[in-house]
Structure formats: structure tokens, C-alpha cells
């Protein structure tokens, strides 16, 4: 019989597609969840699921021992942490409180934010970007690559065990985000490859919805093919992740690869970055990854 994780007090700051799935999973596992988002409608929706609503990031943090951020950029994370009503302003101050950043931001910013938070508040910081999206979060089957001290990464397990099937410490602060860049590069290339494969199958008169079953166990098999092959074949654009968020990550890959200790040529990263820029320019940035199929009909929505 599998034991249930101990009940923890957790704040989730940022309850969009990903953050709301994280919060719902934590609630289902019996944790006490307090949420904050600048969008009050999102907070109200989570309150209907049983979360406690907070009026600021500071208030959410004050009511919690673990603070999860799920936000869109390093600049937004910084405001959530160090703004006038940010996490660092939480009262009472508590150095035992742990920040777990599940956003996807660049490693350099992560190291800077982690150091600043520790200096100002004494709080630990774990960068814990994820793979698997909202569907896996709801099932507690995320893959999380973590960066931070051994003690902080181990302590975060009190929450991560409810969310993850695979939780791996990759090194010190920023190592999780570096690993996420690797993950996103592989995923972006894989999404485009599956989109092209689906369209090629369709052009040849093959039922593309069967590709994942026909190729199962072979070298072309992958999680992306199994999950997105049928979705792309059905033109199912139900939101699971945004194209513009992937572009953000690809731009971070390229910036990192051209950093001061490199440069490193990544030709496929450049190609998929340009494809994603074209999707965003065509107005598809807010759409699901499966909407990449629209490249084959001139980006039309019909």
C-alpha cells in the first residue's frame, strides 16, 4: 500500500494553465493550498476547487511553508519575489520557507534570483522546471529537473512527491533550468518532426491517427509521438501548452548557446526557433502546440 505524503502548506503563485494544474493536484493530495495571481478570475476558479485565495504574493507566502511560482518570464518571477507585495515581503519572515520555482526561465537569472532571495530573507530556492505539461501535473506524473543545494532539493520532495514521477537533482542553482533548455530543444524539434510526419502520412492516404500505434516500440517511438500524433491528426487544439512559451524557451536556448563561455552552433535550434517565430507572427502564439499543424494550410484557422 502506497503511503500518502504528509500534508503541507503550499502557496502557488501564478495559476494559469500550468499553475492551476499544479494547485489542483496538490489539493487532491490533501495539501493546504493558497493561491495568488494577478488575474482575479483565475484565483476565484481555484477557490472553487478548494484553494484559499490570497490578495498578494506576500500574503500567499505568509500562509505557507513552501512557495511554488509558475510564471512566464524571469522578469515576472522577479516581481513576484521582490515587488512591494512580493514573497520577500511576507510576514512573519521565515528562513525555513522554501521557494520552488517551476517556471521556465534562464539559468543566469535563476542564480541571481536565488542568491538575492537568500540574502534578503534566508529562504532557500530550488529551480524546478518541468516536463509533461498540465495533463501530467494533474496525474502527479511530471518530470522535474531540479537545481539547488542538496538539502533544499531534498526538502522540496515534501511537495514534489505529489507532483512528480521523476524528480532529479541536476546540480546547484540554475542546473535545473539548464536541463530544461535541453528538454525544450528536444521537444521543439520533436513537435515539428511529428507535425511533418502526420502531414506526410495524410498526404499518402494513411490514417495518421494510427501512427503512434504502428510505430510503438520502434526507434521512431516517443512520448511526443504518442501524445501529440493523435492530437495533431485530429486537429485537436485543446490547450496544454502555448506556442509563444516554447518560443521564449527556444530564444533562451539560443542566448545561452551564444553566452560568454561559448558560442555553440545549434543549427536545428535555429530552424525550430524561426518556425516558432513564424507561428507567433501569424497570430498563433497563444494556441496549443498541436496548432503547429496550421503551417500546412498557410496558418489559416479554418
Image (spheres, rainbow, N blue to C red):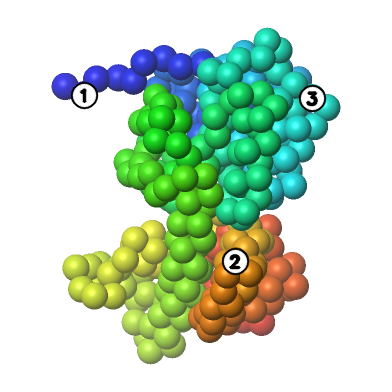
Query: Mark 2: which secondary structure?
Result: helix
Identify which residue, 257 or 172, lies in the foreground: 172
Q: Position of residue 106 (x, y in %)?
A: 61, 55
Question: Would you call the spot at circle 2 few (<14 residues within 10 Å), some (14-19), or many (20 or more)?
Answer: some
Foreground mark, 3 or 1, reads 3
Q: Quadrant of the C terminus?
A: bottom right
Q: Quadrant of the N terminus?
A: top left
Query: Mark 3: which secondary structure?
Result: loop
Q: Residues at badges 2 and 1 in contact (C-beta under 8 Å)?
A: no
Measured in 3D between alpha carbons, the distance from the residue under mark 2 to the one under mark 3, in whole angstroms, is: 31 Å
Q: Residues at badges 3 and 1 in contact (C-beta under 8 Å)?
A: no
Foreground mark, 2 or 3, reads 2
Measured in 3D between alpha carbons, the distance from the residue under mark 2 to the one under mark 1, in whole angstroms, is: 41 Å
Question: Visible in this render: residue 12?
Answer: no
Question: Would you call the spot at circle 1 few (<14 residues within 10 Å), some (14-19), or many (20 or more)?
Answer: few
Identify which residue, 301 or 251, lies in the foreground: 251
Q: Which residue is mark 1?
A: 2
Using the image, tell me which numbered label, if any, was put on residue 85. 3
Using the image, tell me which numbered label, if any, was put on residue 237. none
The answer to which quarter of the image holds residue 204 is bottom left
Using the image, tell me which numbered label, if any, was put on residue 256. 2
Query: Mark 1: which secondary structure?
Result: loop
Q: Residue at x 51, y 61 (%)?
A: 181
Mark 2 or 3, nearer chain start: 3
Direction from residue 262 to residue 42 in the image, left or right:
right
Amino acid at each position: 500500500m502506497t503511503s500518502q505524503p504528509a500534508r503541507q502548506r503550499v502557496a502557488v503563485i501564478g495559476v494559469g494553465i500550468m499553475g492551476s494544474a499544479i494547485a489542483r493536484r496538490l489539493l487532491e493530495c490533501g495539501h493546504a493550498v493558497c493561491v495568488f495571481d494577478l488575474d482575479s478570475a483565475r484565483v476565484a476558479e481555484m477557490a472553487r476547487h478548494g484553494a484559499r485565495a490570497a490578495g498578494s504574493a506576500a500574503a500567499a507566502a505568509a500562509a505557507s511553508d513552501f512557495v511554488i511560482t509558475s510564471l512566464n518570464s524571469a522578469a515576472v518571477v522577479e516581481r513576484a519575489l521582490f515587488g512591494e507585495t512580493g514573497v520577500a515581503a511576507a510576514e512573519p519572515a521565515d528562513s525555513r520557507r522554501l521557494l520552488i520555482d517551476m517556471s521556465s526561465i534562464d539559468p543566469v537569472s535563476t542564480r541571481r534570483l536565488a542568491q538575492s532571495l537568500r540574502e534578503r530573507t534566508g529562504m532557500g530556492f530550488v529551480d524546478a522546471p518541468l516536463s509533461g505539461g498540465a495533463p501530467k501535473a494533474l496525474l502527479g506524473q511530471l518530470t522535474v529537473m531540479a537545481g539547488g543545494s542538496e538539502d533544499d532539493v531534498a526538502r522540496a520532495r515534501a511537495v514534489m512527491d505529489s507532483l512528480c514521477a521523476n524528480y532529479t537533482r541536476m546540480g546547484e542553482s540554475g542546473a535545473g533550468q539548464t536541463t530544461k533548455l535541453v528538454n525544450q530543444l528536444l521537444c521543439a524539434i520533436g513537435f515539428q518532426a511529428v507535425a511533418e510526419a502526420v502531414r506526410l502520412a495524410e498526404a499518402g492516404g494513411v490514417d495518421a491517427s494510427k501512427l503512434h500505434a504502428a510505430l510503438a516500440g520502434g526507434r521512431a517511438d516517443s512520448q511526443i509521438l504518442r501524445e501529440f500524433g493523435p492530437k495533431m491528426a485530429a486537429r485537436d487544439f485543446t490547450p496544454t501548452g502555448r506556442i509563444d512559451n516554447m518560443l521564449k524557451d527556444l530564444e533562451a536556448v539560443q542566448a545561452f548557446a551564444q553566452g560568454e563561455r561559448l558560442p555553440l552552433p545549434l543549427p536545428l535550434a535555429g530552424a525550430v526557433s524561426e518556425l516558432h517565430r513564424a507561428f507567433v507572427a501569424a497570430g498563433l502564439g497563444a494556441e496549443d502546440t498541436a496548432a503547429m499543424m496550421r503551417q500546412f494550410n498557410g496558418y489559416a484557422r479554418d
